[in-house]
Image (cartoon, rainbow, N blue to C red):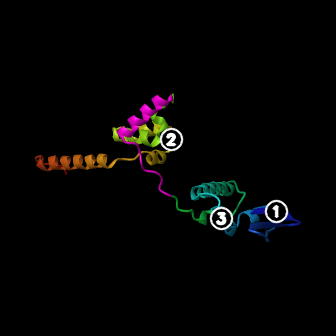
């Protein structure tokens, strides 16, 4: 898809195998580029060539650029990309290495001569083991160099065994609270 000017009018040209279509889009290049239908069509055409996450990243960039154009008074209307829905993305990989797999990997790296190998090279494993070792998520964020805590949350996964232990600790703590004597609260002065 491309936008071009011919005389005083701007046109949008779409190419669908094997034909090309040309439509009048407005008197200014801005009108031609910012029509909601064009953004939707572009999104649908582009998804055939790349993954949904790539389309979503470009839509987010476009949305931000149009928001800035409105802030700087280049556009006076609402953001045409704000109504464009993003594609669903896969939730991502949740697996991390077990302790035995981690040890085997480190041994294999030593045998094959891979130098300068650190847990940081295995971001999911690094974050997951740090959080399960009791390091708070903010510290893990700083260690991993993330600007946003949400990114750190994507990398840190909790094992079922760790979650089971947390629930058992919670049950133990509640049983201790139930056994503790109830203190009377001090009387408040009126």
* Nearer to me, 158 or 169: 158
* Picture layout, residue 84 above or below residue 120: below
Q: Quadrant of residue 101?
A: top left
Which contiguous range is marked in magenta? 90-113
Spot occupied by residue 54 in the image (x, y as percentages of width and height): 60, 55
The residue where tag 1 is placed is: 4
Q: Is residue 157 magenta?
A: no
Q: Nearer the viewer, mark 1 or mark 3?
A: 1
Q: Is residue 105 magenta?
A: yes
Q: What residue is rendered at 11% in x and 48% in y?
A: 179
Circles 2 and 3: CB atoms closer than 8 Å: no
Q: How many numbered marks are there?
A: 3
The residue where tag 2 is placed is: 146
Q: Nearer the viewer, mark 2 or mark 3?
A: 2
Spot occupied by residue 154 in the image (x, y as percentages of width and height): 46, 48
Earlier along the polypeptide chain: callout 2 or callout 3?
3
* Nearer to me, 157 or 95: 95
Please indicate whether residue 141 sits to the left or right of residue 162 in the image. right
* Nearer to me, 167 or 179: 167
Q: What residue is rendered at 68% in x and 64% in y?
A: 42
The residue where tag 3 is placed is: 80
Instruction: Work out how far the residue at label 2 is from the one at label 3, CA to CA, in angstroms.
Output: 31 Å
Density class for disc 3 (Cα within 10 Å; few <14, some 14-19, many ≥20) is: some
Please indicate whether residue 110 sits to the left or right of residue 56 in the image. left
* Nearer to me, 119 or 182: 119
Spot occupied by residue 17 in the image (x, y as percentages of width and height): 74, 68
Q: What residue is rendered at 71% in x and 57% in y?
A: 73
Residue 79, visible in the rendered structure:
no
């Amino acid at each position: 898809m491309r936008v071009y000017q011919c005389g005083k009018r701007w046109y949008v040209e779409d190419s669908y195998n094997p034909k090309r279509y040309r439509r009048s889009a407005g008197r200014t290049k801005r009108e031609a580029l910012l029509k909601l239908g064009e953004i939707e069509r572009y999104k649908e055409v582009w998804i055939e060539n790349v993954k949904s996450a790539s389309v979503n990243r470009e839509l987010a960039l476009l949305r931000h650029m149009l928001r800035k154009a409105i802030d700087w008074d280049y556009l006076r209307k609402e953001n045409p990309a704000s109504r464009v829905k993003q594609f669903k993305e896969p939730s991502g990989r949740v697996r991390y290495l077990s302790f035995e797999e981690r040890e085997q990997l480190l041994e294999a790296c030593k045998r094959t001569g891979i130098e300068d190998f650190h847990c940081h090279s295995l971001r999911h494993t690094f974050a997951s083991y740090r959080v399960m070792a009791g390091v708070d998520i903010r510290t893990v964020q700083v260690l991993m160099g993330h600007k946003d805590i949400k990114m750190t949350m994507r990398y840190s996964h909790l094992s079922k065994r760790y979650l089971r232990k947390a629930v058992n600790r919670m049950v133990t703590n509640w049983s201790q609270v139930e056994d503790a004597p109830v203190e009377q609260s001090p009387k408040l002065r009126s």
